[in-house]
Image (cartoon, rainbow, N blue to C red):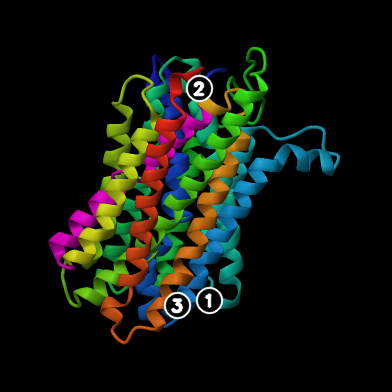
Amino acid sequence: MTATTGQASIARPPATPTAAQAVVAGMVALAVAMGIGRFAFTPLLPMMLADGVVNLDAASWLASANYLGYLLGALLCTFQPLLWRLFGITQQPNGPTLVRAGLASTALLTLGMALPIPSIWPALRFAAGIASALVFVFASGWCLAQFARLDVPSMGALIYIGPGAGIVLSGLAASLMVAWNGSAALGWSVFGVLAVALSAFIWPVFASRGAWPGSAPVAVGPSAPARATRERRGEVSLLAGAYGLAGFGYIITATFLPVIARQSMPGSPWLDLFWPIFGVGVMTGAALASRIRGPGDQRQRLAACYFVQALAILVGLWSPTPAGFAIGSLLLGLPFTAITFFALQEVRRLRPASPSGLTGLITSLYGLGQIVGPPLATALLARSADTARGFAPSLEIAAGALLLGAVVFVSMSKFYPVNRR
């Protein structure tokens, strides 16, 4: 599969990328970094439990190690100019170079999880989280800049089909390996090889021979008045805090969905399909977000997305049946990357000259929310006598966090109108 414009293929990009090349490169990069580097763990977790190489408590800490790495990676993205100066590095790597580094690391670290050395798994998952954040922040920023340059900003949502595609692919592959009685080590090996192949496909696009348009800050007009700056700081704080709630709100379901389904419906033939259904929802939501035209108010769109995800969690609690889990999985996925797309559009509105720092900040808080989720779920599970319903309290808290985030965004839309300046 190659995206072409005229006779130029994606393997031999021109000096400036076309919209099609940027879409395909972004989709594949995020599929590797997120769909494999981060979320391959979810469909492989039941296999790891069946192999007896981890228990739920150890699995929770493996998940949190990955999310902690994601948090650190986001912080590194936020402060990377300062870090380069601190270490006296004058020739700083550009965004595409860092994307390449993240993709290569993701493939190697995924392959490393196949090694029968459980003591190194937390370190591998931690490092994979750092790599995922690097790819997410710099691939997203680079692609969105290309679409802005080409005056097609709505196409930015299409790159977020990538994580959904990676989730579907990893989920279906894990289902086949379960049917064939494959081991978790085989699963990690397969996903590692897949990450290598996909990274090689887009490797030339993220050329390291110089900064492409959009990789450097865009020049803007005079600074805003001090009062406007203070207002922007308030908006930034609320945006970052609400975005962090999204990280906490979805992560318990995204980490334990196959396990929760197995506990609620042991022996059901549908168990291994709920995770791919989640991925289909991610892909569909990203495609729908790309069809939204006009600037609009991203806060209102974010509020609607948070409400849908909260509803998705509650559907699974109210109806722990195949239909309930299928509907809940689809609804949870629909706003998943749309939330990211709308939030990054808001970042570009608030910080048009240098969006990467604010992108790293909100991604850091999102990562912090993710870290809290799995340990909370296992702690509450340990207090429950019924494993099948032991996840319910943590899922109810997660749904409440998403509803709170929706309220924050609605309030922001009211008190900080877009057209006030």
The residue depicted at 49 percent of the width and 36 percent of the height is 202
Label 1 sits on what residue type?
Answer: Pro
Q: Give, as a single range, the part of the protein colored magenta.
A: 320-348
Q: Residue furthest right?
A: 88
The residue depicted at 79 percent of the width and 32 percent of the height is 91
Q: Which residue is mark 3?
A: 379
- Is 233 colored magenta in this rendering? no
Q: Nearer the viewer, residue 129 or 194?
A: 129
Foreground label between 2 and 3: 3
Label 2 sits on what residue type?
Answer: Gln
Label 3 sits on what residue type?
Answer: Ala
Q: Which residue is mark 2?
A: 146
On the question of residue 265 being in view, the answer is: yes
Which image quarter is the N terminus in?
top left
Q: Residue furthest bottom?
A: 385
- Is 337 colored magenta in this rendering? yes
Rendering coords of residue 38 (x, y %) = 47, 56
The residue depicted at 59 percent of the width and 43 percent of the height is 361
SS at mark 3?
helix
Q: Is residue 219 above or below residue 215?
A: above
Q: Which residue is mark 1?
A: 116
Foreground label between 1 and 2: 2
